[in-house]
Amino acid sequence: MSNGTNIDVAGAINTLTETFGKLFQMQLDVANTALKALADVAEPLGKTATDLVGNFAGAATQILQSVSAAIAPKK
């Protein structure tokens, strides 16, 4: 005495499990891509920051040497 509507519970659960698995994998892929992009950006920024600090240190040294030479008594 079926009214013609059979519910495939196992198929529905299988489809849900497969969908959640794909969503989880997509989240992992997005996180991995974001971390890779962040690393790709951070590397040149770190090098530039290091170069900038070195340039400032060199400029400060030259300024101090110039000031010292100007103040030092002439022979």
Image: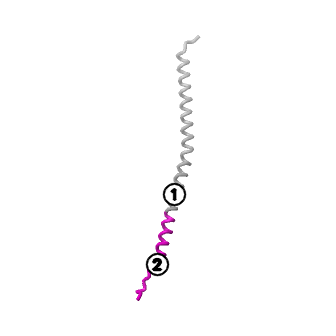
Disc 1 crowd rating (10 Å Cα; few below 14, some 14-19, many 20+) is few
Picture coordinates of residue 54, whole percent (x, y): 56, 33
Q: Is residue 26 above or below residue 73?
A: below
Q: Which residues are magenta?
A: 1-23
Q: Is residue 50 above or below residue 38?
A: above
Which is nearer the eye, 62 or 4? 4
Disc 2 crowd rating (10 Å Cα; few below 14, some 14-19, many 20+) is few
Query: What residue did someone put label 2 on?
Result: 8
Amino acid residing under circle 2: Asp
Q: Quadrant of residue 45?
A: top right
In the picture, measured across the screen, residue 75 lies left or right of residue 18, that is: right
Secondary structure under badge 2? Answer: loop
Picture coordinates of residue 1, whole percent (x, y): 41, 89
Q: Residue at x 49, y 68 (%)?
A: 19
Picture coordinates of residue 20, whole percent (x, y): 48, 66
In what quadrant of the picture does the C terminus appear?
top right
Amino acid residing under circle 1: Val
Picture coordinates of residue 35, whole percent (x, y): 53, 52
Secondary structure under badge 1? Answer: helix
Residue at the outermost right position: 75
Residue at the outermost top position: 75
Using the image, tell me which numbered label, if any, was put on residue 30.
Answer: 1
Residue at the outermost bottom position: 1
Using the image, tell me which numbered label, if any, was put on residue 55.
Answer: none
Specify the principal SS of the magenta part.
helix
